[in-house]
Image (tube, rainbow, N blue to C red):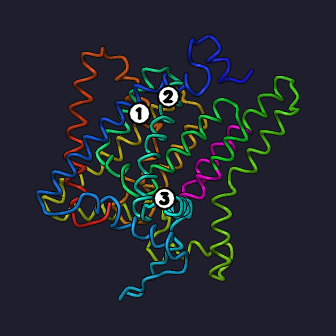
Amino acid sequence: MTDLETRTAGRPGASGPPGALRRAAPALLGYAAVRALGLLALALWSAARDKSAYTLLTARWDSLWYTRVADLGYGYEVRLPNGDVHSNLAFFPLLPWLERLGAAVSPLSYADAGFVVSLLASLAAAWGIFAVADHVYGPRAGVCAALLWAVLPIGVVQSMAYSESLFTALAAWSLYAVLTGRWVTAGTLAALAGLTRPVGLAVAAAVWVAAITAYVRGRGEGGTDGAGGARRLLGMLLAPLGAAGYVLWVGHRTGKGPLGYLDVQAGWRNGFDGGVAFARFVAGKFTSFPGALAGVGLIVVVALLVWLYVVCVRQRQPLPLLVYAGIVTVLALCASSYFGSKPRLLLPAFPLLFPPALGLARLRTARSVPVVCGVAVASAVYGAFWLNGSGPP
């Protein structure tokens, strides 16, 4: 009997997909309501500024690069006056493949298909976040975790034709498969996550850590691997194939070897510098008084993220969740990428939301509902304001 079967065997009506959907229904309905509020706020704000909300969601910034890949394939690049080369090889292929598939089997354009994929993937991500939190802490915490992910200030990105929702869905369900001992499923989903974003390696690392820990624990208890060990090994082998395969293909395509993808990222001024560039960016805010306030805010946010991770450790989150969230957070904060994108790079780090979700779950419904509603309204307004700005999210 697997761990999942153990948890559901005594739960009336919870076995099988229909039961699982009924159990997740409050989280999914709440998530959908929050996102609908965010889209409504975006539509009203954009209309007041004579802009198209749908264009903001589907046809600006990274979403344009994804649709170009879907339409023309790889090989498109832009050479900037300063010598930088922006190549579409920087964008992993799963979302463009799904856009192309959607356009092939329906009257949708590539942009339309990307929007539909993101909407469906965001629901799948909310369900996955609920499933993980429910497995570890119970259903009430699961609902709160899904709602907190929905009301993040930059939650509007979850509805954009970007890859964050798709990646988070694959990551969440891969981690759920890990926690329930479904190694081949976990490895397959990790491989797909690796075809979605470079940080897919964080999912692969979580699978590997969990598998090695399970093997060591089993050996310590005098058990034998058998068929379970074979499935665990297969999951480990599958997990890194997506990210590693695409990176190696880019290296072959560019003729620059296994590390050629790093050169592609360098053309976008992306790289890993241990947080030096971000620290300089924050320090530069203190050269003026208004900027100093922003600098203080950034320091507070980073401190909050570190504190949340420490709380996750103290609450003894499962090791795969800690490994995954830690890698996602470090890569987001320590990359020398466009600093305005860092908030959305942190979107997949959903295990960091589990401590506040637990706190919210302990409140009575009469107190927790107004809190969530108030934060949802603030998030919707901020998301509309943010997405109508000049820079990419």
Question: At numbered mark 3, what does the secondary structure look like: helix, strand or loop?
Answer: loop
Q: For the residues carrying marks 1 and 3, which lies nearer the camera in this image?
A: 3
Above or below: residue 5 compared with residue 100: above
Q: For the residues carrying marks 2 and 3, which lies nearer the camera in this image?
A: 3
Front residue (pair 216, 237): 237
Front residue (pair 15, 170): 15
Rendered image quadrant of residue 364 = top left
Question: At numbered mark 2, what does the secondary structure look like: helix, strand or loop?
Answer: helix
Residue designated by label 2: 133
Alpha carbon separation for disc pair 1 and 3: 30 Å
Marks 2 & 1, CB-CB < 8 Å contact: yes
> Residue 106: which disc?
3
Closer to the N terminus: mark 1 or mark 3?
3
Q: Amino acid at mark 3?
A: Ser
Question: How far across and how far down the image is residue 69, in percent?
Answer: 50, 71
* Magenta span of residues: 191-211
Quadrant for the N terminus, please.
top right
Marks 1 & 3, CB-CB < 8 Å contact: no
Residue designated by label 1: 146
Question: How far across and how far down the image is residue 222, in percent?
Answer: 87, 24
Q: Residue at x 34, y 23 (%)?
A: 360
* The magenta stretch spans residue 206: yes
